[in-house]
Structure formats: structure tokens, C-alpha cells
Amino acid sequence: MRLSELHTGDKAYIVKVNGSGAFRKRLLEMGFVRGQEVKSILNAPLKDPIKYNIMEYEVSLRRSEAVMIEISMVKYDVPKYEQATVEKDSERTSNQSTFIHPPKPPKHQKDSKTITVALVGNPNSGKTSIFNIASGSHEHVGNYSGVTVDSKEGRLKHKGYTFKMVDLPGTYSLSAYTPEELFVRKHILEKKPDVIINVVSASSLERNMYLTTELMELKVPMVIALNMYDELQGTGRDFDHETLSLMIDTPIIPTIGKKGFGIPAMLDKIIEMHETKSENEDDKVHISYGRVLEKALYRLEQQFAKTDISHLNIPLRYLCIKLLENDKDIHEIINTLDNHQAIFARTERERVYIENLLREDPESAFTNARYGFIAGGLRETLSEKTNISETTRILDTIVTNKYFGFPLFFVFMWIMFEATFTLGNYPMEWIEWLVQVIGNFVRSNMADGPLKDLLVDGIIGGVGGVIVFLPNIVILYAFISFMEDSGYMARAAFIMDKVMHKIGLHGKSFIPLIMGFGCNVPAILATRTIESRSSRMITMLINPLMSCSARLPIYILFVSAFFPKHASLALFSIYIFGILLAVVLSKVFRKTMFKEENTPFVMELPPYRMPTVKSTITHMWDKSRQYLQKMGGIILIASIVIWFLGYFPHNKATEKVFDEQIEQTAALFSQGEITSQKQDSIVSGIEVMRASVHQENSYIGQIGHFVEPVMRPLGFDWKISVSIITGMAAKEIVVSTLGVLYPGDGQSQESLQTRIQKETYSDGTPVFTPIVAVALMLFVLIYFPCIATIVAIKEESGSWKWGLFTIVYTTLLAWFIAFLTYQIGMLF
Ligand code: GDP
Ligand code: MG
């Protein structure tokens, strides 16, 4: 029977996991091992994925993945011939002599007052919380896997010692399948921290300890932080961690990461370990994998007898285990050795030996042995489990309910957007006002000239344009952070997964895409939570098609001018068109550039947890700072460049003509021929004309004229082209540029809507028709998102290549779609 056939609410036992490679290994490591009890808890509203309970935690699997797992409805006894135990290195009687290269961590002076510490643990075990409290940093914590993608370093002082602490990405194991796993393994082997703090979540001990067993093999001094100790106490279970600590010869300190409880005790322990580092420090315990595996290991170790591997800095036993487990990375390392052929041949023989004797492949054999060891240890120290927390169970039946799940989700989304854009509007207005006040202050206190114009229009205007979005970003992130910390985000991904899977993406892609409607920049930063690189890249690349709020003023202008009767429908259609285009492109990208999906969709659904105010505020503060830092510099430069292109060259002669006209008007007024009101109106008309003429002659105007032939087939004149070019800095600028370039007759105050409706070519045909308006709106929807978005894509993808790619593909696509719209529209 297959796991996918298990009815909701039923229990079964794992027989075996089929499939191969990364996917299979991940499932094994997540606890889907022989004999384990698994329970199907609930289906997503669309019947896929399915939530299972295994090893006391919850995980979601797609139906297509659950098919790979064979189950049995009756409990059966796992053959007992290979129970793993612990053993002291020095007691390894059989192969003492093979320990020719005892691993030698670089020797420290005993009195060294600096201790380097690495935090290692499963996603969501509380590493970042501990890191933040210990080092006083403000890293983002989230009840959602994959939040920490790279490592963060912090320092702290405790009892005269300086701790250099590194927060590493969360991993379930140390195999070589995901970038995070490789990163953590490399860090430990190459940087050789003095101590590893293995953060273990007490609420799912069995699975968390899997990583512990792997870490033990690396032979780096280790303390276990038994985190979420409050949750363990809450369930009323007894855990004799002192005994377990003796069994595995590793200190275990209970901690509560978000409150800081236990952290001083942990630091004390580390100092104690550091000070009493004994001579026989290499004499640690290791897991003994049972007769068959140990024999294979022993013979493989023998093979290394004449090979010098000390430069690799990897314990020999670890190398051999990983070779038998068919680890790609270790394979490459061995490849650099002289006699690698003999080693590989021996490995192959031993793998066959294991398969023959144990009737399972070596990967499963080692995984089973590790889990067997853990189960044995916990059986003696941890009392029987009670059920998964009631609140989590109740909340989940509501939140992922067939009927309520989606409506509830959309209500949350709606509240989030309302708050972001309606609530955010107030502070936005204050900031706009402040920017204006500062601008006016400079304007009235500085001598006229290019420098003043640069300062007022280029710098203050440009930077002001970035800062005004800050309130929206802060509010948006308050919500996102709440959803992540509470555990709801994982559920949102869970219910959306089937839909997203249809377009080749992951449930986790949904949130960044939704955020894109607000602003593409934070949305692209939010793609970090997607584990698989290919899904992350696709989500990033299609994100600009989610029409951000900066494009809204443009749509409103044209919709109200040309489709006043069907305004909502027209607006809605544009958004939908963007989404459909994103769907198509996502499929195209998946089929062409990002073919392989390298990580399976095995997502942990953490229990609900109440986020702390502190962590939410820290998160908001972090994001705001990140936004200002990352975007500020580039936007500043871009605004200056665009200002420069629009300001120069300054034509003295034309300026003079306008100045003279203004003087003439003043003369007329002083002669009493016109009223002061009339004078004001004429002067403002002249000023508008001046700005318009100036724009046309400026470099930007010249560029506009230059690209006009390319834009003509879309029905755009040079003025539209100029607006489109200025819109590259930020889409809001399109409207203000149109305002300058279509001054109307310059005398009467008319709205921009009427002005563009009246605008004609020299032969009298109107510039703007409904078809041109549609083509333009679509062009604006699709083309070059904005400089900030491109910078964000570059930052998150790690290379300019993808930034450039986005510029090219969006602009070509925009041209093509606008071309089709206009040309087909003209036929009717
Ligand atoms: P990381 O993924 O390992 O870095 O984990 P985080 O530090 O981001 O924490 C994951 C979640 O667990 C967050 O919602 C934290 O607030 C919460 N958390 C961390 N430590 C504890 C703890 O000791 N007890 C409880 N109840 N929650 C905790
Ligand atoms: Mg973290």
C-alpha cells in the first residue's frame, strides 16, 4: 500500500521509501524510515498536499510524493540484528591501527580568551532567537523554515571571554543535497569552530536529534541547547536529559530561546569545556552502526592506510561513512587523491556487501541505524508522548478547512493590503509634506542655478520618492512577520501549493507574488523563504508582472479619461492580464531555463506560536533599514542621472524668449491693461510652456525623439516615449512627465485627463485613442519594472545577469504586446 492511499485520520507504518537521490534522502532524514508510525492528518482544501504526522511533528507532502512511500497498516517488528550503540573511540578494538590520521583541530592556547561558536540545528529550532539574545543582534526569526539563508556573525562577552558566534542556516542533516547542508558542513570542516552549539527543538526531539548524530561524527566539541524547553514542559512529559547527555557524552542544556533562559548556563558550559580541554580530547564517543556497517567501514578505512588525508581536515571515519552513503561532495574530494580509484572500487564492493547482508541500500541502512540509535536513547529517557498541541490542531482544522481555508486566507490578504495602502497613506502624506517643506526651504534659501535645481529636484525629489514608500513597507512587514512567526505562513503555502504547483512553482511562491501588488522590491526580498533555487529564481523573474501600486496612478489617469463607464472592470482586467502573463512565463521559464527542481516539497508545518512583540518590531526595523540601504544609494544616483538628462542642455536663447514674455506681461500689468489675476494666469501658462519646450530639447527629449520610430508602431508619440523613459526610475514619474509634456493650451487650468484627450497631431488626429490608452497601460504594466526592482533582483539572485535579463525580457515583451494590441485594435 502507498502512503497516498492512507485515509485521513488513519495510522500506518513505513515499509520503505522508493525513488532516488535528493528526494528520497530528504524523506529518510525527515523521519520516513522503516517501522515509523505515520498518520494522515488532513488534506489541503484542493486535496493536495496532504499533512502527515510523523515523529511528533507535522509535515506536508504532495500526493505525487506520498506515492513513493510504501506503508503497512499493521505494525511490524523491525529486524533487530543491527541495533546501533555508542562506543568510545579508544574502545574501537578492531581497527586501532587504522586511525593513522586522528583528526586534529587546530590547537588553541589554553588561555585563549576568544571562543568561536557555530549555531547548528534544524530550521525553526530557535537558532536565530538564541543568536539574537546572546549577541544582542537583530536577526530575523521566523516560524517558517528557510529564513536564515546565509550565516550571520555576532560577538558577545561572558565572564571575561569573547564569543564569536555564527548563526548558520537551518538543516535537517549534513548530506550534500541542498546548498544549506553543504554550507553548514563546509563551515564546520573548514572554519573549525571551537564549539558547536547544536540547537535542538524539544518539541520534536526525535527528528532534531538526527542532525545531532551526524554532528557527533565531525568530532568537533559540541553542546546541545535543548531549546523550546517551555513547550516540552507544557506537554507535561518527562525528559531525563542528564542520562541522555551521559549516553552520548555531550552536555545538554535546557534553553528557552525567545526568553533567553538557559543561555548563560550554556555559555558557562562552553567556557568550562574550553578550559578543561583534556589531552585525550579526541577520545569522544561515536555511534557504532552494528556489525555489518562497522565491518564495511573498517575495511574501507583500511584502504586509506597508505594515503595521506591529513590535509583534508576531515575525520577518516566520517569520510568513509559518507563514501558509503554515496555523498557527491565527498566523492569529489576523494577524487583529488592519488589512489582514488582503489578507494572507489573498495567503496563499491562494500556497498554491495551491505546491500546483500542487510537487504537495503547503504543510505537507508545508515539512516535507519541513526534513527534506531535515537529511538533507543529516547525510549529510556523520554516519557510517552501526548498528542500534538490542541490549539494547533483546532486552528489547523479551521485554517486549512475545505470551505473556510481559502476565504479566510483571502480575508487575511485583504486586511494586509488595506492596512498597507490605506493606513500607510497617512504617514505617506506626512512624509510627502515633509519632503515638500524641505524642498521649499532649500528653494527659497539658495541662489538660483543648476546646483539648487539638482538639490531640490534631483536629490530631495528623488530620495523623497523612495522614502514615501517606507510606511507601506513597514506595515506590510509587520503583517508578514506576524504570519511567519505565528506559523500561518507555512499554512498559506500549504493551501496554495496545488495551484502554484500547476504553474511550476511552490506554495511558498505565493506570498512574494501577492506582495508584488504592493511593491515589487520587498516582494523580491521575500523570495528568500523559498528553498529551491529554481523556484526562487522564477518567482523573482515573474514578480514584476504583479502590477505594483506605483503603476496605479497611470492606470487611473487613462481609465478615467477613456473608460469612465467601466473603470473598475478595466482596472481589474489589467491586473488579471499581468497575472495570466506571469503564469505563462512561469511555465516557459520552468520548461527552458530552470528545468530541474532540486529540492522536494517536504515542508514542515511548525506548531502555532505566539510571536513576541520584540521579534516583530525587530523584523520591521530590519526590513526598513534594508530597504533604505539597498535602494537608497542606487535610487539617488538614478534620480541624479535622470534629472541631469532632463535638465541639460540649458538653452540660454529660448530661456530668454520666455523671460521676455514674462517681462512683457509684467509691463502690461503695470500699465493697467490686465488685472493681477490675468497676469498670474498668463505667467503660469508661460512657465508651463517653458518647461515643455525645455523637456523637448533636453537630452531626455532627444532620446524620446530618437526612439520614437521604434514606438510609432505602438501608437506612441515622442512625448509618450519620453514619459516611458523617465518611468524607468520609478513608475510614478510617468504621470508627472506626461503632466509636463502635455501642457494643454497653457492658459486655462484643465485636468491632465482633459489635456491628453484634447492633444492632437499636426494633422488634427488625436494622439490618444482608447486603443493607444490600452496599449500604453499594457506597456507600463510589463516593461522595465523600475531601477529599485532591478537592484533587488541583482542582490537576491547574486548577479547582474538576472537583473539585465529582466530588463531585456520585460521590455521586449512589453513592446510586443503593445504592438499586437495597437495593430489589432486599429483593424476595427
Ligand atoms: P531558526 O529557524 O532556528 O533560526 O529559529 P527562530 O529563531 O527563527 O525561531 C523559530 C520560532 O520559534 C520563532 O517563532 C521563535 O519565536 C520561536 N522560539 C524560539 N525559541 C523558542 C523557545 O524556547 N520556546 C518557544 N515556545 N518558542 C521559541
Ligand atoms: Mg534562523
Image (cartoon, grey):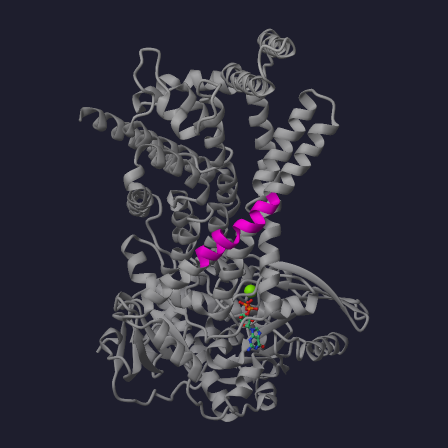
Answer whether residue 287 is visible to the viewer in this image.
yes
Left or right placement of residue 558 versus residue 443 in this view:
left
Residue 37 image position (x, y, % from top left) = 34, 84
From this view, report whether residue 820 is shown above or below residue 301.
Answer: above
Find the magenta span and give its range: 416-431
Answer whether residue 338 is visible to the viewer in this image.
no
Residue drawn at (46%, 53%) of the image: 527
Return the residue found at the far left. 828
Residue drawn at (31%, 37%) of the image: 564
Residue 508 image position (x, y, % from top left) = 40, 59
Image quarter hosting the C terminus: top left
Indicate the quadrant where residue 293 lies. Answer: bottom left
Indicate the quadrant where residue 405 lies. Answer: bottom left
Confirm whether the magenta stretch covers residue 417. Answer: yes
Frontmost residue, 222 versus 669: 669
Confirm whether the magenta stretch covers residue 65. Answer: no
From this view, report whether residue 736 is shown above or below residue 582.
Answer: above
Image quarter hosting the N terminus: bottom left
Q: How many marks?
A: 0
Query: Most prominent secondary structure in the magenta stretch?
Result: helix
From this view, report whether residue 590 is shown above or below residue 455.
Answer: below
